[in-house]
Amino acid sequence: MAQLYFYYSAMNAGKSTSLLQSAYNYAERGMNAEIYTAALDNRFGEGQVASRIGLKATAHLFNSQSQLWNEISQLHAKKPIHCLFIDEAQFLNKQQVQQLIAVVDELDVPVLAYGLRTDFLGETFEGSRYLLAWADKLIELKTVCHCGRKANFVVRIDQNGQAAKEGEQVEVGGNDRYESMCRKHFRELVW
């Protein structure tokens, strides 16, 4: 029986690497693994999931208007999907998480969603909020703060090298704009 998995972490914990490795494992066994990623994150090229260690794969794109149930059920009717992977799952909305649950429950396709738990202010993203509430399995991927403690927050760095304390929730960037930190250091800089 299929399940919905949510793999969450701060930045630089290997979410995309884990996704790509798992998708490769399915493909290596001749199984159909489909990958989706957020259209707004095109740092590595449009329709690409890439990891910092150089792995990458082509992906379908989703945005806030995407009707994932319709798209995925059509793909599944053409060629059965053995596993569905979602990168940047924090950018899903409530209805899209519900649609992924329908993929699991109605199509019996496992869905593995990977994303950030919180934004640069420590607030949950909409997609993460509902995945944390409704996923069958929650798996935390860990990374470390500069002090060596587990990092579970992300700090956005402004143009002056300081921690941002306001701004839009979504601003795409990598190591040049964000740093993963433990709660202690996050509190000191952001709260």
Image (cartoon, helix red, strand yellow):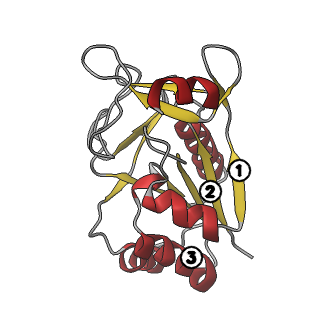
The answer, for residue 191, to whether it is visible in the render is yes
Q: Residues within 10 Å of mark 3 (few under 14, many from 20)?
A: many
Residue under the point 57% across and 63% down = 131
In this rendering, would 116 be left or right of 110? left
Which of the two discs, 1 and 3, labels the residue nearer the N terminus? 3
Provide the secondary structure element on which disc 2 rests.
Answer: strand
| Residue placed under numbered mark 3 in the picture | 101
Provide the secondary structure element on which disc 3 rests.
Answer: helix
Q: Position of residue 113 (x, y in %)?
A: 55, 56
In this rendering, would 155 be left or right of 165? right
In this rendering, would 95 be left or right of 115? left
Q: Are marks 2 and 1 in contact (CB under 8 Å)?
A: yes
Quarter assignment of residue 84? bottom right
Residue under the point 60% across and 76% down = 104
The answer, for residue 111, to whether it is visible in the render is no
| Residue placed under numbered mark 2 in the picture | 6
What amino acid is found at the position of numbered circle 1 in the picture?
Answer: Ile
**Screen quadrant of the N terminus:** bottom right
Q: Are marks 1 and 3 in contact (CB under 8 Å)?
A: no
Towards the viewer: 36 or 58: 36
Which of the two discs, 3 and 2, labels the residue nearer the N terminus? 2
On screen, 17 above or below 149? Answer: below
Label of residue 90 in the image: none
Label of residue 139 in the image: 1
